[in-house]
Image: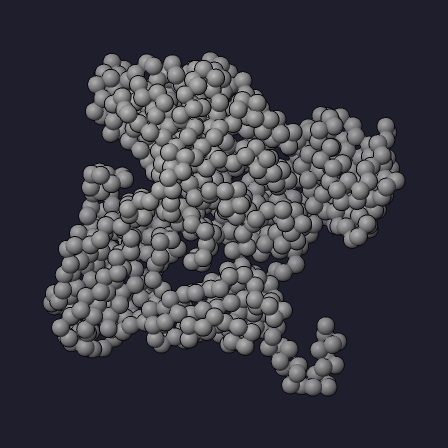
Amino acid sequence: MMKYLLNQFLVNKVKCMAWLLVLWVQVFTARVSAQVFSGSGIIPKPVVELRQSGSFLIQKTTRLYVAGATKLSTSFFDQYLEDLSGFSLLRSNKAEPKGINLIVDAGLKLKSEAYLLDVSSQNITIKAIDERGLFYGLQSLVQLIRNEGKVITVPGYHIEDAPRFAYRGMHLDVARHFFSVEVIKKWLDVLAFYKINTFHWHLTDDQGWRIEIKKYPLLQSRSAYRNETLIGHKRANPHRFDGKRYGGYYTQEEIKDIVGYAAARQITTIPEIEMPGHAQAVLAAYPNLGCTGGPYQTATYWGVFDDVFCAGNEETFHFLEGVLDEVIPLFPSAYIHIGGDECPKTRWHGCPKCQKRIKEEKLKDEHGLQSYFIARMERYLNAKGKKIIGWDEILEGGLAPDATVMSWRGLEGGIAAAKLKHDVIMTPEKFLYLDYYQSLNKSEQIAAGGYLPLRKVYDYEPMPAELNAEEQQYIKGVQANVWSEYLSDASKAEYMIFPRVIALAETAWSAKAQKDYPDFLARLLANGRFLKKLNYSTAYYDIACESVDAAKGFKLSTDLPNAEIRYTLNGKNPGTTSQIYRSLIVIDKTGTLKAQLFKAGKPNGKLFEQAIVKSMASGKKVILNTAGQGNYNIDPQRLTNGIQGSYLYNSGEWLGLSGGDFEAIVDLGEEKTVREVGINTLNYQWQKMHPPKLLVVEVSTNEQSFKEVSRQTVFSQEGINSILHQLHPVQARYVRIKASNVGVIPDGFYGAGTKAWLMLDEIIVN
Ligand code: ACM
Ligand code: ZN
C-alpha cells in the first residue's frame, strides 16, 4: 500500500490527496477502528491463545483418536466435518502423532469445563478433565477451521481456556409466545457453540401454561390457551385484540426430548414454574386456587395481574406439589426455578384465608406471606433433592434458607443476596433483557421497552464492585432473558436474541481483561458462517447521531468498517451522490436529518432518520433545580440538544425524577421576545412514568424575579405529551419551567402507591 501511495504521489499529487482523504474519512466515521480481529477469532475469547507456526491440514486420511470420552461429545465434530467436507474421519485406537487426539483424563490439572487445545502442522490435541471441557475444546476447534474449497486447514495455536463463570445462561419465555421443539433445538445448537451451559425455560405465566401435567388435565385444555392476543404495544390505549385462540404446550415426551438434546450439548435445562404471581392461566382452569374464586381467564395481554395463587388456601400448595411431582423427574437439573417475581399483594390483602394465614403464622404482612409461600415450596423441593432459584423479589419479607437469587430489577437484589451468603445469578434488565430494542431506528420490530444495543450488553460487568472478594464468590454467573410478549414468531425472536446473546456468552466465559468490544465485533463478523442460518440483527452498525452542541453541530458515526455515511437535510433519502459525512453537521432549523451507510458504493443497512428540533433554546445553558435520578440523571444540556426523547425511555434523552418535581431555567443569553414555550413529558404507566399534575411557565429578564406566563393542569394519560404554550409576546432572557410530579402512583395504575417518575425532554422556546 505504501509503495502504491508513493508511486501515486510521484505520478499525481492530487489523486493521492484524495486517497488520503478517503482514508481519513473512514477513520473519522468509524467508532470501532479494529476491522481485523486479533488472535484466533474464537468467541468467547479464550484465556490464552498463542499462534504457533504452520497449520494442520485435515484430510480424508486424517485419523482421530478419542480417549475417555463418550461418542456424544465427538459426534458433533464428526457431523461438522462431514457437512464441511463430505468425509468422516477414520478412528484410531492409539494416540496419533500425525492426527487428531481428543483426550478426557480426570487426572489432568485442569478445572471442570476447561480445555487445552494445541494445533501444530503435525497434529491437533484437545485435553480436558471432563466431557464438558472436551466439548468446549471442540467448539473452539470448529471456529479455528479455515476452509477454502475442499481444503480444510487449522492454523497452529496453543490455547488454554476455562470459563470465568460456572453459570452461563439464556432464559426463554414460551408462555407469551410458544416456540416449537425444532426451533428450540436450533437455538440450543447456537448457545452450546458459544459455550452457554444453562437453558432457563420459563414454562408458565398468565398468558399460557406450557408443560403437560397429567394429574391436572385442565392445564392442557384450558390454561394452555388464551382466547385472543393483544395487537401492538401494551401501552396502546385502548387495547385491540386479534380475536384468535392461541396456545399449545409441550408434552412430557417433548420436554424430555429437549432436555436430552440440551444435555448432549452440555446445557442444563432449568424449568421455571411461576408462583405465587403470574398464575392467571392456572386460575382460569382451577378458580378455587385464587383468593376471590374467579371467574378468571387466561390473560390476553401483557402485564402484571392482581389475581395470584391464594396463599391462605391449602389446596394451592397441594396443587403446586402435584405439579412439581411431575416436573422433577423430567429435569435432572439440581435447580427448579419457582418465579417469585411481580406478585401484587392486593388480593391477599383483602382475602380472609390469606389474612388468617398471616395471623396464624405470625407474619408481619403480605411480604411475610410471600416469604412463607416461597420458603414452604423450598422445603418441599429440598425434600425431593432439588434447590430453588427465584427472581429477586424473593428477598422481600425474608429470603428462603437456601435459595439462589436471580437479580433482574437491578444489581441491588444480587448484592443483597450475596451479602447474605446466597448464590446469585446476575440478569439485570437494563443490561441483559433481550426483549429491549437494540436499535433506535423507527423501523424496528415492536419490542418491550427500553434501549439495549449490543455494545451495552457486551460492556456489562457482572461482578458488582460493592462486594468484597469473599462476597463475590456468591456471584455464580450471568444470564440473558428473552421475554416473548412481542416475539410472535421464531424469526422475530431470533432477531432479538442474536447476536446479543453471543455478547453475553463472551461476558460469561471470557476473562474480564480479555474483553474488547471492537475486537469482539470483528470476530463476530468473521463468524458469519455460523450465524447465517439465523435471522440475526445487524443493528450494531446503526448510524449513531450525537448532538455535540448547538453551535458545533451533530456527529454521525458507525461501527461498520470501511463504510461512508451520506446524508441529507432536505427530507430526501440519501443516495450515492448525497453529501458524504466528514465533519460535524451544523443544522440551523427544525427538520429531519437522514443518513445512509454506503459500502463499496452500495447502500448498507437501514435508512437513518432523526428529527432535529431547533428553537431559541437550542444549545442554551440549562440550570436545573434538582438533578435527574437513577438511569435518568442525564446531562441537563440534553434538554436543549435538538433531539427529543422517544418511547425508548432509557436512550439518554429523558430526564427523570422519581417522586420529585422538575424546575429548569433556560438562559437565552440575551433578552428576546418569547412567543412560545414547550417541553415534552413521557407518560408510560408500565414504567411508572406519569404526566405532571401541574406545569407552569415563568419568564424573567434578570434571573431574580420571575413572572408566570402560562400554566397547564390537564394532560393526556398515555404517550408523549408535546406541551407547547402560546404566550402573549413577552421580553425575557430566562425561561423557567416548573412541573409538579403526581408523587405517588394513583390507584388503578401499575405500581400504585409507589413513587411516580416524571420524565421530561427538550425545551423549546420561540
Ligand atoms: C421478570 O422480568 N419479571 C423477572
Ligand atoms: Zn387468599
Q: Nearer the viewer, residue 118 or 144?
A: 144
Q: Nearer the viewer, residue 231 or 731?
A: 231
Q: Position of residue 485 (x, y in %)?
A: 42, 41
Q: Is residue 25 left or right of residue 675?
A: right
Q: Does residue 561 show up?
A: yes
Q: Nearer the viewer, residue 542 or 305?
A: 305
Image quadrant for the C terminus? bottom left
Which image quadrant is residue 244 in? Answer: top left
Q: Position of residue 370 (x, y in %)?
A: 32, 24
Which image quadrant is residue 234 in? Answer: top left
Q: Position of residue 185 (x, y in %)?
A: 60, 35
Q: How did the renderer colour the structure?
A: one colour
Q: Is residue 751 left or right of residue 338?
A: left
Above/below status of 80 relative to 395: below
- Residue drawn 66% across the image and 81% down it: 16
Could you tell me how many numbered marks the image carries? 0
Q: Is residue 110 left or right of residue 730?
A: right
- Residue drawn 80% across the image and 35% down it: 101
Above/below status of 545 relative to 64: below
Above/below status of 710 relative to 182: below
- Residue drawn 20% across the image and 62% down it: 737
Q: Does residue 163 show up?
A: no
- Residue drawn 25% across the image and 19% down it: 354
Q: Position of residue 389 (x, y in %)?
A: 45, 27
Above/below status of 24 relative to 449: below
Image quadrant for the N terminus? bottom right
